[in-house]
Image (cartoon, grey):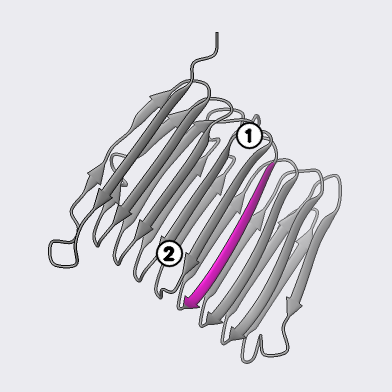
Amino acid sequence: MKKFITLIILLVTSSIYAGNNDIYITQTGTGLTLTIDQIGATNKVGTTSARAIVSGTSMTLDIDQIGSSNTLAASILQGNSSSWTYSNTGDSGSATFAVGATGDVAGSDFDWASSGGDGNVLIFTQGADATATSGDQDFAITGASNNLNVKCEVIGCTNAWTISGSSNDIDTVQSGANDHDITVNLTGSSMDVDIHQTDTTSTNVANLLLQSSGGSGSSVDIDQCASGC
């Protein structure tokens, strides 16, 4: 029998007494539905030394942080056929995801949205394990001076970015085999975009769309190769 777990966590802090709410999670099982809402500043879901850890198939995770200087650090050990949504609204937020380092995450989907804020950082790594196969990641950024660092070491990795603002720094690496794909839609100026795709057997695809008002003063570097990128 499948085990279904539903967790709903709501943390609300006023602008006067904002922040300092901490959540630490370690969970293993099938069919987890996890919803976390944190409103305020300096809230945390996991830390670099004590990450939130989840593992299981068919999981649905939805994490929303609204406010400034909130942080998230999570490890998704195994989670095939699962979806994760992370939304950040505010300035100076930091999020780190390690996905599939020790197990299968085939058919997984990750969506990240950062809106109305500046100076946010996302570090997303999927792979480092042969069984960490396939992944679909969508990133939407509105704001300035945000930093997105994405590394995908799995088969059939697909990224789609919609970026609006200025001075955003976007770096991604896709390696492994089987048809890597990146689509980038830029609206803004003075952005630094680096795309490195290594595919040992199939095709690398990079689609870059600069809107009529986008890309001014931006630097875009695309490297595609069979090895050595």
Residue 122 image point, x, y percent: 46, 59
Element at label 1:
loop
Residue 120 image point, x, y percent: 41, 68
At 23% across and 45% down in the image, what residue appears? Answer: 22
User: Along the polypeptide, which appears first: circle 1 or circle 2?
Assistant: 2
Q: From this viewpoint, is residue 79 visible? A: yes
Does residue 2 sit above or below 183 in this rendering? above
Residue count near mark 2 (Cα–Cα under 10 Å), binned few <14, some 14–19, many ≥20:
many
Q: Main secondary structure of the magenta part?
A: strand
> In the picture, residue 39 is in which quadrant?
bottom left
Does residue 63 sit above or below 117 in this rendering? above
Over which residues does the magenta segment extend? 135-143
In depth, the one of 111 and 134 nearer the eye is 111
Mark 1: which amino acid?
A: Ala
Which residue extends farthest top?
Answer: 1
Residue count near mark 1 (Cα–Cα under 10 Å), binned few <14, some 14–19, many ≥20:
many
> Circle 2 is placed at which residue position?
121
